[in-house]
Image: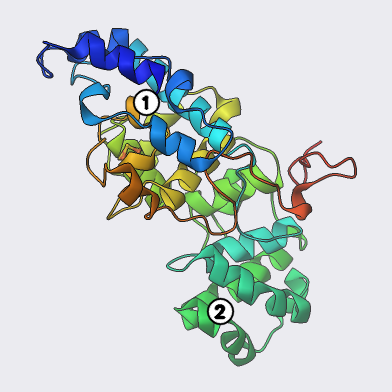
Amino acid sequence: MAVAAKDTAGSAAGTKAVTAAKAAVKKAPAPKKVVVAPKKATAAVKGAAPATTVVKPSRDESRTALVRRARRINRELAEVYPYAHPELDFENPFQLVVATVLSAQTTDLRVNQTTPALFAKYPTPEDLAAANPEEVEEILRPCGFFRAKTKSVIGLSKALVEEFGGEVPGRLEDLVKLPGVGRKTAFVVLGNAFGRPGITVDTHFQRLVRRWQWTDETDPDKIEAAVGALFPKSDWTDLSHHVIWHGRRICHARKPACGACPIAPLCPAYGEGETDPEKAKKLLKYEKGGLPGQRLKPPQAYLDAGGRPAPPLGAA
Ligand code: SF4
């Protein structure tokens, strides 16, 4: 068992869980000692603290304590997912905005399997604006809601051609005027194609920030504002990736893998899912990013000529 976990167990001895909440926050082990497990994923699993050692932020957690805890969670996730990035494949802002619109109600993997054919046939907004809808529908069929999505991507291509000279605009107020583009899509595009900070409040983000008691809000715009106030703007885009990656791989909607979770000691919802480490390990989903707890190998597309992670498209 990790040293810090023993420490915590010792300090908790003879102390009632409820009344110890505040003290537990103060005596909480440094999360790095408990959870950082660069060697392999199972190290994080072993380090995940049992229920009695988990910090349970009290309902009256101070604003300062909340900010500190939120930022610690983000720092831990940054170590687990150092190369977190949008999982949609794209080569330019046009492809990103189209792929993001297509990703509604389906997986990024499915979109990535679909867009190569779409962009091979319609590489520019002009091409897609002039497309035969029935032919586009056939390509988009695997993404679900293919008629509505065809309408959206053709409509947004027309708007790009007619109102923005065939270029994706780099301003929120312009992006949200495009058909099928809401604030969530706009922030994905701004953050990842233009290097402008934005918080992406998707279904994973909403679920996780509520589990972490970062906010009680349920409206995405209010969640965005509440969470944005906990972090410097420069953290927003990476924070969104970290949270979404964690939601996809470990903190699932139905069965969060609490026993294999590297931020269990900081999570008030620990125990909502499987806490047995061995059973929890079986719930992890890796998709294309490798194992949590490992330094993930960045996809080639995100490396620059020197082998370092490339800056976002459009960044200076
Ligand atoms: S609910 Fe469980 S899996 Fe999700 S962050 Fe908390 S401890 Fe981790």
Looking at the image, residue 275 sits to the left or right of residue 242; the answer is left
Note whether 304 is above or below 55 in the view shown. Answer: below
Note whether 176 is above or below 172 in the view shown. Answer: below
Q: Position of residue 116 (x, y in %)?
A: 71, 74
Numbered circle sitting on residue 1: 1
Residue at numbered disc 2:
150
Mark 1 residue element: loop
Quarter of the view holding residue 22:
top left
Identify which residue is drawn at 77% across, 54% down. 301
Q: Position of residue 302 (x, y in %)?
A: 75, 49
Identify which residue is drawn at 40% across, 44% down. 205
* Other-residue count near label 1 (Cα within 10 Å), few / some / many at <14 / 14–19 / ≥20: few
Q: Where's ligand 1: which quadrant?
A: top left
**Which amino acid type is marked by label 2?**
Thr
Q: Position of residue 223 (x, y in %)?
A: 36, 37
Identify which residue is drawn at 49% across, 66% down. 107
Looking at the image, residue 12 sits to the left or right of residue 232; the answer is left
The residue positioned farthest toward the right in the image shown: 305
